[in-house]
Image (tube, rainbow, N blue to C red):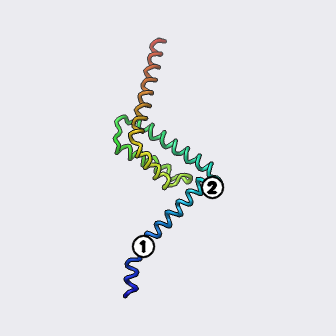
């Protein structure tokens, strides 16, 4: 009887211990990946994919002038999940990046609006030059 009681409560503890061990292993592997013998190259790869993801998000935001925060979150998920399937990125790193991007909704919205205004101004200037030439 006492033995059955032990197993009833050991399950949750074992699961928690397994989760902690898994998280520690993942942390150690990611640390080795980013700071091991090839760490500098790996960090550059991660920086590149983050930059590409940010540029892609901004480009899509420019196309959708009135994007809501909910739509932005779905866009971030779509793009980071795609990058997460890449071996050098991985789903955990992509999920962390998605959370950071989502936390910067306002900043990204303002950057997309600036880019949209700059593009509109450039188009207007080109149109004015074309009219002068005609």
What's the residue at 52%, 54% (across, down)? 90
Q: Residue 74 carries which label?
A: none
What's the residue at 65%, 54% (across, down)? 37
Residue 121 sits above or below residue 57 on the image = above
The location of residue 132, given as percent across then percent down, is 46, 12
**102 horizontally vs 86: left or right:** left
What's the residue at 58%, 53% (across, down)? 34
Q: Count the marks: how many?
A: 2
Residue 12 sits above or below residue 86 on the image = below
> Can you see residue 62?
no
Q: Distance between the residues labelled 2 and 1?
A: 33 Å
The location of residue 2, given as percent across then percent down, is 38, 86
> Can you see residue 57?
yes
Residue 104 sits above or below residue 29 on the image = above
Q: Callout 2: few (<14), some (14-19), or many (20+) C-alpha neighbours within 10 Å?
A: few
Q: Where, by quadrant of the figure, is residue 61 drawn?
A: top left
Q: Residue 36 carries which label?
A: 2
Q: Is mark 1 on a helix, strand or loop?
A: helix
**51 horizontally vs 112: left or right:** right
> Of residues 6 and 73, which is closer to you in this image?
6
Question: Which quadrant of the rendered structure holds the N terminus?
Answer: bottom left
* Residue that lies at the very extreme toward the right in this rendered image: 37
Residue that label 1 marks: 13
**73 horizontally vs 47: left or right:** left
The location of residue 121, given as percent across then percent down, is 43, 23
The location of residue 21, given as percent across then percent down, is 50, 67
Mark sitting earlier along the chain (2/1): 1
Residue 76 sits above or below residue 130 on the image = below
């Amino acid at each position: 009887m006492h033995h059955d009681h032990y197993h009833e409560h050991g399950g949750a503890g074992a699961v928690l211990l397994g989760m902690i061990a898994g998280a520690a292993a993942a942390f150690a592997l990611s640390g080795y990946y980013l700071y091991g013998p090839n760490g500098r190259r790996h960090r550059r790869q991660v920086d590149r994919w983050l930059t590409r993801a940010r540029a892609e998000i901004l480009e899509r935001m420019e196309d959708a002038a009135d994007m809501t925060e909910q739509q932005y979150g779905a866009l971030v998920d779509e793009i980071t999940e795609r990058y997460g399937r890449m071996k050098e990125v991985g789903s955990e790193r992509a999920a962390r990046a998605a959370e950071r991007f989502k936390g910067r909704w306002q900043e990204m919205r303002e950057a997309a609006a600036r880019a949209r205004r700059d593009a509109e101004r450039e188009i207007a200037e080109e149109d004015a030059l074309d009219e002068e030439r005609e």
